[in-house]
Amino acid sequence: MNRVTRLYYLSRRWWKAVRLFMVIAGPGIVVMIADNDAGGITTYAATGAKYEYRLIWFLVILGPVAYYIQEMTVRLGAVTKRGHAEAIFDGFGPFWGWFSLLDLLLVDWLTLVTEFIGMTSALSIFGVPGWVTVVAVCLLMGFIVLNGRYWTWEKLAMAFCAVNLIYIPGAFLVHPDVSTILRHGLIPNFPGGFTGELFFYLMANIGTTIAPWMLFFQQSSVVDKGLKEKDIPWGKFDTFVGSIFTVLVAVFIVIVTGTVLYGREVTDAGEASRMLMESHHYAGVIMAIGLFDAGLLGAICISLASSWAFGEVFGWAHSLNNKITEAPWFYVSYFLALVSAGLVVLIPGAPLVLITLFVQVVAVTLLPAALVFLILLLNDKDTMGDRTNTLWDNIINGSIVAVIIALSTLYGISTLFPTLFG
Amino acid sequence: MSIKHALQTIVADQLEQVRAVNRRYATPRLKTSPAVRWALLILRLYLLTLVGLLAYKFITILTH
C-alpha cells in the first residue's frame, strides 16, 4: 500500500513537471529545430553524400555547442526583459546598435530568400509552380501570426517542428547498416585527411548550426512569451531538448543521403530529393516534405526575428499578443520582409546562387559581434545579478565563441575565395 | 497634400525616430572596463578587415 501511495505521488509530481514544461517549452525547441532550415538541410544532405556517415560525430558535438550559446539568450531575455537588439543598443550605444540591427535586417532578408528557394524547390518536385508556393506560404504565415496570440503562434510553430522530425522515420526506409553507422560515424575522424574540402564542409556545418538570427530570435521570443527569472531552468531545459532534436534531424539526414547517395555530387536538398526518388521513392518524398517544412519554419522564425528587433529599438508595439491594429509597424515589417523575399525567388534569372553564397559572408560580419556582445552582457553583474556568467560559463562559452568566430570567419573567406584553402 | 509633401513628411518622421533612438541610447550603459574596450576594438578591426576583403572581391569581380 505504502509503495502504491509513493508511486502515485511520484507520478503526480512527474505529471506536474511535464505540464509545467509543456507551458514553458517553446522558444528553445522552435529555434533549435528551425535552425535546421532549408540551407541546413542542403548542408547535411551534401555532407552525407560526400562523406557517408563519417562526420556524424561532428554533428553530435555541435549539439552542446548550440545549447551553450542559446541558453545565454534565455538568461539574458528572462532577466532584462529585452530582446538582443535592444540590449546591444542599451549596452553599447547607437554605433554598435545600428550596425547590429541593419546587419541583422540584411542577413535575415537574404536568409529568407534562401528559405523561399528551398520551399519552391521542394514543392516543384510535386509539380507545384513557384508562384503558387510563394502565395500559399505568405497566406499561411499571415494566418499563423495574425491570430493575435503568442501562445497560438508558438503551438503552430511547434507543430511544424514535429513535421521536421519526418527525417527520422525516413532514414529507416533506406535500411542503413546500423553497425557501419556506429563504426564509421561515432569515432572522430577526418575522412581523406584534413583537406581544404573537408574543412569547408566542417565550417558549413558550423555555419548552419549557429546563425545570428537565432540569438535575436530566441531572446525576443523569451521576452514575448513573458518568461521570468524563475522560469530560467525550464527555459534552459527547453533549449536542451531542442538541441537534441536538431542534432537528431541532422544525423538522420546524413544517414539517408550517406546510405543512398554516397559518392554522388549533391548541391542542394531539392536535387537530393529527386535523386533519392530514383531508388527510394518515399524516402525522396520525405526529403522534399522535410525541406519544405524546414524552409517554412525558418521563414517563420527569421521574419519574426527582424520584426521583433525593429519593434524593440523603435519602441513600437512588437508582440504577437498584439492585434494588427495595435502593432501595425510590427506586422508591416514582418510582411514586407516576407513578400519581398518571396518575390525575389520568382524573378526570372535572379542571382539565387550568388544570394545563397552571399548570406554566408554577410552572416560572418554579424555573428562574431552578436556573440561577443552576448558574452559581455552576460558578464554585466549590475544587470544580470545572480544570473551573471560564472567563471566556468565564461571558460566554456568563451572557448566556443572563439572557435566559432575563427571557423565562421574562415568559412566566409573561403566562400569569397574558394581556392584559398586548396 | 501633394505626394512629394507626403513623402517628405514620412521621411522627416522616420529621421526623427532615428534621432530619438540615438538620443535614448546615447550613453552606453555597460561599464567600459579594459576587457570591454579591447573586445570592441578587436571587433572594429575585424569588421574593417572583412569589409576590406569584401571590397577587394567586389573590385576583382568588376575588373575581370
Image: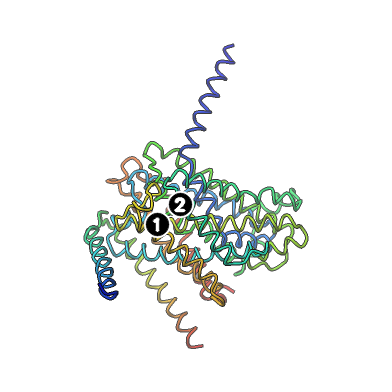
Q: Where is residue A164 in the image (x, y as percent from the top left)?
A: 60, 51
Sequence-wise first label, 1 or 2: 2
* Residue drawn at (44%, 80%) of the image: B56
Packing grade of label 2 (10 A; few <14, some 14-19, many >=20) is many
Frontmost residue, A50 versus A109: A109
A416 lies left or right of B35: right
The subunit carrying tag 2 is: A
Q: Position of residue A309 (x, y in %)?
A: 37, 57
Residue B62 drawn above or below residue A312: below
Disc 1 is placed on an element classified as: helix
Frontmost residue, A357 versus A142: A142
* Residue drawn at (47%, 37%) of the image: A23
Frontmost residue, A248 versus A24: A24
- Give the spatial CA distance, label 1 vs label 2: 9 Å
Tag 1: amino acid: Tyr
Tag 2: amino acid: Val
| Residue hosting label 2 | A145
- The disc placed on residue A347 is none
**Pointer 1 with pointer 2, Cβ within 8 A:** yes
- The disc placed on residue A331 is 1
Disc 2 is placed on an element classified as: helix
The subunit carrying tag 1 is: A
B7 lies left or right of A415: left
Q: Where is residue A289 in the image (x, y as percent from the top left)?
A: 64, 56
* Residue drawn at (53%, 65%) of the image: A114
